[in-house]
Amino acid sequence: MRTALSTARAVRPRDHRPRVLAAALATALLASTLSAASTLGATTASAEPNTLLSQGALTAASSSESGGLGPRFAVDGDRGTRWASNPTDDEWIRIDLGRSYTLDHIALEWEAAYGAAFTLQVSQDAQSWTTVATEGAGNGGTEVYDVTATGRYVQMVGTARGTGYGYSLLELQVFGDGEAGGPEDPPPFPDDEVTHHEFQANCTFSHFLPDDSIVYPNQPGRSHLHTFIGNRSTDAFTTPTSLHAMPESTCTVPQDHSAYWFPAITKAGVPVEPNIPMTVYYKSGIDDYTDVVPFPEGLQFVTGDMMATVDEFRTAPGAVEGWECGDISKSWEIPAYCPEGTQLNIRYQAPSCWDGMHLTPEESAHMGHGSHMAYPVDGQCPMSHPVAVPMLEFKIAWPVSGDMSDVALVSGSDQSWHYDFVNAWDPEVLRRLVEHCINGGLQCNPRGYDLYKPHRGTVLDQNYELVPEPAAREEVAS
């Protein structure tokens, strides 16, 4: 049944669902109680009827006209943004509510480009769908449909457009029995402008080895030569357990026992040792930086593609600035010449969306689930990888300049750049840094201190000991 918006029931704001889902997935994995995402769909929550369930939820769509018109803008509660599809009839937009709910109505608020014919469908698993409303004479504006259904996923499937453009929704709202919520607490520092959401790990050179414990575990010498920073014990036999057992590291923060490595650079065939601290940024890879949660213990991944072409490297989600030196940036090949005295740099970002289940590429591939890590799409994590974790951005530098014709990556072409990471942080320190710096919208040094916002305090004191949480905001670092 379609009704006007004015007849819709009272709307209760929904709690911050993406963070709840991410935290639940991460906690469940570490406790070894989550077997699959379908487990979440089996539980039906019930509390207050007519609760707005969809705001801030994960979304997907068959297409988007541009990144600024992605599906997440149909669930952000802002009538100044919208989702717009490509100009074809067969298009869809999907919402993941995070778990199963009893639903009572769905509201569509169209922009000028509306749907003339479409169906609304509900599913428990995003595979089998039940049609709960059918529209064959839509005329735009705001349309509200009473539904009787239970499910986790809701989608609008368009079959005919009302204009020559695509489908364009200002808001797609799903209501049902959910947790009653109120307005979110105001930020503790409302006058702080958020320009960054990051902290740094600064690590110096450790050693060279032709080892790779992720790609060739327990096979010393099998890999091409790698440059290692961070944990000094890293080799072909490395595991998260061994990193904690042998924690000596070249990183500034002693509680970071993690392993970081990448292919060696050679000049005239001789490996080049980085001679300054390397920077590994821990950032938000999604627009809503408050939804980022710490890496699960033992997470491992490889970033980059050894077989990438120039065009694939240039357009890769992780290729931030490519190769650079002096005034040269966004070079997708190692420059032929770098001004004397400069250093060759590369900046590359890792995927920051985790599937919530698998800790290693091998484990994920063995279970037939593809990669356990993915890049965000249109500013949010995809439904297949719903947990937003810190986005690593490696900024690596080598002391080579002048004629660069004999400078090369040992892994192959200039586009074969990649790097590996094994998380072995002290969990409490990582949690505090993520919450204080990334979720808090700060630009932190390795201790969790923002030089431009000293009133926000720090996470680690000058001896790299944790500052007690109640005092963290009060301490001003020097």
Image (spheres, rainbow, N blue to C red):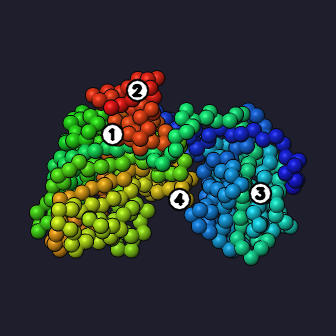
Q: CA distance from mark 3 to mark 2?
A: 47 Å
Amino acid type, callout 2: Glu
Q: For mark 4, what is the residue?
A: 377
Closest to the camera, between mark 1 and mark 3, is 1
Disc 4 or 3, which lies upstream in sequence?
3
In the image, is 54 to the left or to the right of 413?
Answer: right
Depth check: 165 or 118 in front?
A: 165
Residue 408: quadrant of the picture: bottom left
Q: CA distance from mark 1 to mark 2?
A: 16 Å
> What is the x, y in percent for residue 15?
65, 38
Q: Is residue 288 above or below residue 66?
A: above
Depth check: 478 or 14 in front?
A: 478
Amino acid type, callout 3: Glu
Closest to the camera, between mark 1 and mark 2, is 2
Secondary structure type for disc 3: strand
Disc 1 or 2, which lies upstream in sequence?
1
Closest to the camera, between mark 3 and mark 2, is 2
Depth check: 410 or 37 in front?
A: 410
Disc 1 or 3, which lies upstream in sequence?
3
Q: Residue placed at 77% from the left, 73% from the top?
A: 163
Q: CA distance from mark 2 to mark 4?
A: 38 Å
Q: CA distance from mark 4 to mark 3?
A: 23 Å
Disc 2 or 4, which lies upstream in sequence?
4
Disc 3 or 2, which lies upstream in sequence?
3
Q: Is residue 345 above or below residue 426?
A: below
As drawn, the label of residue 109 is: 3
Q: Residues within 10 Å of mark 3 (few under 14, many from 20)?
A: many
> What is the x, y in percent for residue 338?
21, 69
**Quadrant assignment for the C terminus:** top left
Q: For mark 1, what is the residue?
A: 446
Secondary structure type for disc 2: loop
